[in-house]
Amino acid sequence: MTNLVYLVPLFPLIGFLINGIGWRKMPKSAGGVIGSLAILASFVVSLGIFFEVKASGTTTVVNLFEFISSGKLVIPFAFQVDALSSLFLLIITGIGFLIHVYSTSYMHHDEGMVKYFAYLNLFVFSMLLLVLGANYLIMFIGWEGVGLCSYLLIGFWFKNRDYTNAAKKAFVMNRIGDLGFLVGMLLILFNYGTLSYQEFFGQLSTGQVAATSSMYNWIAICLFIGAMGKSAQIPLYTWLPDAMAGPTPVSALIHAATMVTAGIYMIARSAALYDLAPVAQNLVAVIGLATALLAATIALYQNDIKKVLAYSTVSQLGFMFLALGVGAYTTGIFHVMTHAFFKALLFLGAGSVIHAMSGEQDIKYMGGLRKKLPITYITFLIGVLAISGFPFTSGFVSKDEILLAVYHHNKAYFWVAAVTAVITAIYMFRLLMLTFMGSFRGTEEQKHHLHESPWQMTMPLIILAILSLVGGFVQLPHLFGGHDFLNEFLAKANVPALVVEDPGMEMREYTLFGGTCLGLIIIFIATRKLFAVDSFKGEYGGFKKVLANKWYIDELYDAIIVRPLNALSSAFDRFVERMGIDGIVNGVGKLVRWGSDRVRLLQTGQVGFYIFVMVIGMTLLFAISFFGFSN
């Protein structure tokens, strides 16, 4: 089955080509079926590859063709199939298929539905290329591909100027991070003469190429800059909340299964490098922790249902980077998997709410939806419990493991992370209560339109809800009778797990007891505030207004970056472009024209004048030649 790995990205590529070429004439339902079947076929092949890798535990490199050959530099177009890539294949194609099925109903009334599925297939193809690449160059091609597709999908409704601005913002901020990734690749190529994972990590382990610790750190930091852009970490995170401009299934795909997890995958794949770069590794932990806390505080007072989930994604990505930064690579990957389940569930649940509300996204006009949308409510509740770390949900197991790893590494980090986890539970239960509890606060027309979504939308919700509940059992702690299956599986791909000294039963029991009490307290507080839900106006003052306005980070960026750059570009346009370059070009033209106007005066039309001038010229030439030769 491993030899057929090329089929995994090939099916979405074929789906993209069919829908992309025929989107003007193809029926909308046909485009949805083709796009969904392409991802389903990839999922089936990925499933076979996963079980083969699980059984054999081997790493296989499949060379498709020679991509670059220049002197001693040979870079093949090759795929690496191992435990890490096979796990990501399942996440991308599995969650991606559910989102495609959901989209067949959600986008049914959109005139560009077939084009939408073409973009969606191209998105999945690019992400599969990213995780399958056997070297950094193939990863970078997929890396750029998902950046392009995010631009196309975020700005899909391009007639809205705000949406196109959000797409451009995402594209530009990702290019900033991509520059760091490119510099890191060039440093690897210059120092080690290869971009292949196996050759590069082999040289690191054997020390064939002498390198200082500073070189390791510089390479790792450059790669991390790329991850900061793609996975929305401080300071390159502001594009992700604005990415909510795209259709809701796109938000689910970007936030859960594809684009934003690319940075996590890249650092986990480069674990051998980061273990040799302590400065870079600590930077990953600090940036991740700061991002998790900042985004969680912003999510507390957002009124847009998708914005709350967007900042939640930024915060959860911070948790993943925190795990990577303390050396718990498999724990970070574990949270990627569980986060894919419950975050896709939450976004698709939000899409179901928006669908029922006729496109309304502001929670101040919602409330009381649990009776009209029972399936959406129950599944959304499961997603909220999972992301809040409620005991024995998938989010509880993965987040608990992160907190234990951080506790072993740095207790100050642990307490900040614990506070962030509490804030996460608070804003998620707030969102749940304001959306589904109390009485309806919207218009009578919206109330009349309220209805549960069709099966194409509710079926993915139910599947994701089940996965959000049971997904944590692959890494259930020994305390609860579980086994570290994921650690053992990823160890076959040389992704190390953090060896934590046994924290003892007391720490485990404290974590479980604390999590249970916390969950009950939050539910109690949220329920007690149920009577305040009906009077919710979505208006804030004081410090709440600061959080509602996202700490004014966008305004700060606008003041210190955007406006100065606009002023500088205006100055360059006026003085360098118009007065300088254009002035020189236009000046040459004016000079030639002025000279021509003067020279043409010699053309009088009088034959006698022409003869006179000719005689004068001959006399001058005779004099010059005579005196010249005589000298």
Image (cartoon, rainbow, N blue to C red):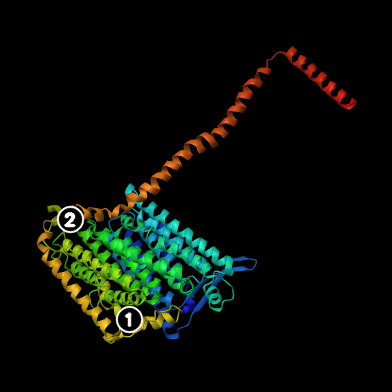
Q: Which residue is mark 1?
A: 475
**Picture coordinates of residue 523 (x, y %)?**
16, 70
Q: Secondary structure at mark 2?
A: helix
Observer-nearest of 513 and 439: 513
Observer-nearest of 21 and 118: 118
Badge 2 crowding class, 10 Å Cα cut-off, few under 14, some 14 to 19, many 20 or more, is many
**Picture coordinates of residue 492 (x, y %)?**
45, 82
Seen from this angle, which residue lies furthest bottom? 481
Residue 466, by quadrant, is bottom left
Instruction: Give the side of residue 503 with respect to residue 51, left or right.
Output: left
Observer-nearest of 341 and 38: 341
Q: Secondary structure at mark 1?
A: helix
What is the three-letter code of the residue carrying label 2? Lys
Looking at marks 2 and 1 on the same chain, the residue that comes earlier in the sequence is marked by: 2
**Which residue is rendered at x = 28% and y = 76% of the image?**
394
Q: How many marks?
A: 2
Residue 356, by quadrant, is bottom left
**Which residue is rendered at x = 57% and y = 34% of the image?**
584
Residue 245, by quadrant, is bottom left
Q: Which residue is mark 2?
A: 364
Is the C terminus in the top left, top right, bottom left or bottom right quadrant? top right
Q: Is residue 511 visible?
A: yes
Observer-nearest of 265 and 463: 265
Real-space CA distance between mark 2 and mark 1, rounded to the nearest whole angstrom: 39 Å
Instruction: Give the side of residue 432 with respect to residue 138, left or right.
Output: left
